[in-house]
Structures are given as structure tokens and as C-alpha cells.
Amino acid sequence: MYIRSKSLYLASMKFQIIICCLGSSSLLFSQTGGNNTYEFLNLAIPARVASLGGALISLKDNDLNLSFQNPALLDSTVHNNLALSYIDYFSDISYGYASYSRTFRKLGSFSAGIQYLDYGTFLSASVTGETGSSFSASEQSFNISYSKPIDSLFSIGGTLKSIYSRLEGYNSYGNALDIGAVYNNRKHLFSSAVVIKNIGWQWKTYNETHENLPFEIQFGISKKVKHAPFRLNLTTTHLEKWDLTFTDPSIQTTDPITGEVIQKGKLNRFGDKLGRHIVFGGEILLTKNFHIRMGYNYQRRQEMKLDARPGISGFSFGFGLKILKFHLSYGYARYHMAGGPNHFTMAINFSEFYSRKQ
């Protein structure tokens, strides 16, 4: 077997980072995502979502980027919009997304986009240190989304994903489907939504074993405080699985007589299990063109913090700014004491570049 990197040491470090951190904003490979393939589908991409905790499916706010999280958020307000996102991830890994939307009055709203994850360039090396040729590893998903309002309050939508993964000489492809619905009451400044993510199948496997896709059910609500510049978001993740805790060898011991494993921590408390499903986010709407954002992901904090120095692991921050006709967003999510990724997003409404004839 080969170890891949620009040097043997960097290879080991890099793949440890991939295994530990690739699970996305709300889950990790070693916990909820360990038995799935195509985990890159769950990475938090839009800077706005990253700054609000890593999960946001209920905010209907004329933002094409949010439809990446819930296709039901796609509507006529983002007609002729282009959204671009880039994330400077750990090591020299990067990923991003680009999408464009159109609305047809009788048919509904459509968008097309591509999501990618680039692991970088590697130099193969044998276990004895003999180097070989260089190669790359990457994964992509080509997405087509559709949404249509049922009435003035409800909308439904779906996203079909065609997935391709290339890891050195191993290739795999599959399809996945997201289905979402949203209730948006503008009068009461309230919205709620549900999304079923990554229903699908791995058509071609890396080897002879089929792997599951990262299936997930989410529910969320958003509420703007009346007569105040505050908006609150709450998203519940992984509703298909109650217990997201894991066994940490560092906080367990063995009974010397029976050999039974004894947990010394309190990982099995009801409150801890519940908290791992909840992501909080809030926005301060200072002006129409400038927003400050912050979020908290309890599961991320519990799984990534150091007990001696938890710091701000699990917290995230960012802002949104409109300059001329460009909507710019920045998000920073603190995963660990070692740092966190920077998210950059830009959205453009091409219709604003020309004035309609009267």
C-alpha cells in the first residue's frame, strides 16, 4: 500500500486531517460518518451557513447559496443569480461550489451547480521510503435543483446529484437526491423547513464493497425579532439517529474483576445526546447591506475540543456585505485549537446590471 504526500511525514499528517475533519460541519468521519462514502456532500460550503453553525435549511431570504442546503429555498427572487463559494480547508485541501439559477413562470425555479473537493497533489512513496510518481485526488458532484411554490406559504424542491470520486487509481460514482419543503410566513417573520438528504446509491464502488451514502434528515426554524435587528435560527440534524455519542477510550476504564468497560464520563446523558442534534445561529441586521453572524455547534465542540483547552471550538463567526451589485460573505468556523477553515462566498444578480424598459 502507498502513503501519499509531498513527503512521507506530510502524507501521514495530511490523511489524518482528512479522516478526522472531512465529515463536515455537523459530523465527523470517526463518529456519525464513518460507515459512509461521499462524505464531502455534507461539507458546509456557503460562508453564511458556516458562520451560523454549519447547518441552515429554513431561512428564505433571497439567497441562492441557501438553496444548496435546502432546494425548497430556491424561488423567483434568485432568478438570473450566480453564486460562487471557495473554502480554504485544512492543509492544502480546498473545496467550493458554483451555481446559477433561472425561474420560469409556469414551470418553477431551476438551478445547476457543481461542488468539488480537491485534496491536492501527492507524491507516492512505498513503506520503505522509495518515491514514485505524483498524482491527485478529488471528488465532484454535479447538481440540478428544482423548486415550486404550492401556495403563498409552502414550497417544495429537490436536488439530483451526480457524484464522481477519484482517489489515486480508485474511482467511484453514484447518485443522490435531496428533498426539501419550507413554510414561510412573512407576516409573522417566521419560517420552518425539513430536508431529507442524500437518498441514493453508489453505482460503481472503489472495490467490491458497496458503501452507504451519508443519509440525513434535518428540521429547522428561523425567526426575526419584530422591531429589532435580530434573526435567530435553530437547526436539528441527524433526526434519523438519536444517539450520536461515541466511546472515547481516554475516559473509560475496565472493571478488574468482570472485565466490563466502565464509562467515567457523562457522555450518555439525555441532555448531551439532545444537544448533539442542535445547531444555533444568529444574525445582527445592522443595515440592509451589512450583517454580522455567529453560530454554535454543540456536537462539533464535544468531538473536537481539548479538555484542557476547549477554547472556542464549535463557535463560528462571519459577516455579509453588499458592495455595489455584489453580495460578499465571509465565514470562519472554529473546529479545533489548531484552527478552522475560512469560507468566502460571492453572489451576483445579473438582472441588476441592466434596467428594464418602462
Image (cartoon, helix red, strand yellow):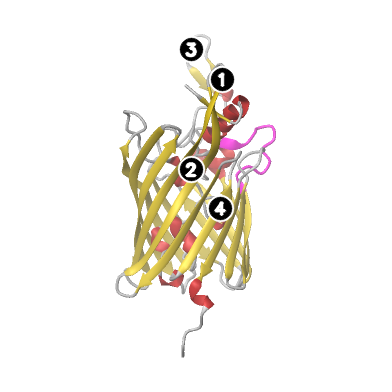
Residue with the mark numbered 2: 274
Mark whose residue sits in front, 1 or 4 = 1
Mark whose residue sits in front, 1 or 2 = 1
Mark whose residue sits in front, 3 or 1 = 1
Identify the mark nearer the N-term, 1 or 4.
4
Q: In which quarter of the image is residue 109?
A: bottom left
Residue with the mark numbered 3: 259
Residue, far bottom: 358
Near mark 1 (Cα within 10 A), the count class, few <14, some 14-19 or many ≥20, is few
Q: Distance between the residues labelled 4 and 3?
A: 50 Å
The kind of secondary structure element at disc 1 is loop
Residue with the mark numbered 4: 86
Q: Distance between the residues labelled 1 and 2?
A: 49 Å
Verify whether residue 304 appears in magenta.
yes
* Residue type, numbered disc 1: Glu
Out of 247 and 328, give the one closest to the viewer.
328
**Would you place residue 282 above or below residue 90 in this image?**
below
Near mark 2 (Cα within 10 A), the count class, few <14, some 14-19 or many ≥20, is some
* Residue type, numbered disc 3: Gly
The answer to whether any part of residue 121 appears in the image is yes
Q: Which mark is residue 165?
A: none
Near mark 3 (Cα within 10 A), the count class, few <14, some 14-19 or many ≥20, is few
- The answer to whether mark 3 and mark 1 are in CB contact below 8 A is no
Q: Is residue 21 left or right of residue 154?
A: right
Identify the mark nearer the N-term, 1 or 2.
1
Q: Quadrant of residue 5?
A: top right
Which residue is depicted at the point 35% across and 64% down? 147
Residue with the mark numbered 1: 130
Image coordinates for residue 167, horizontal then vertical, percent = 45, 35
Identify the mark nearer the N-term, 2 or 3.
3
The kind of secondary structure element at disc 4 is strand
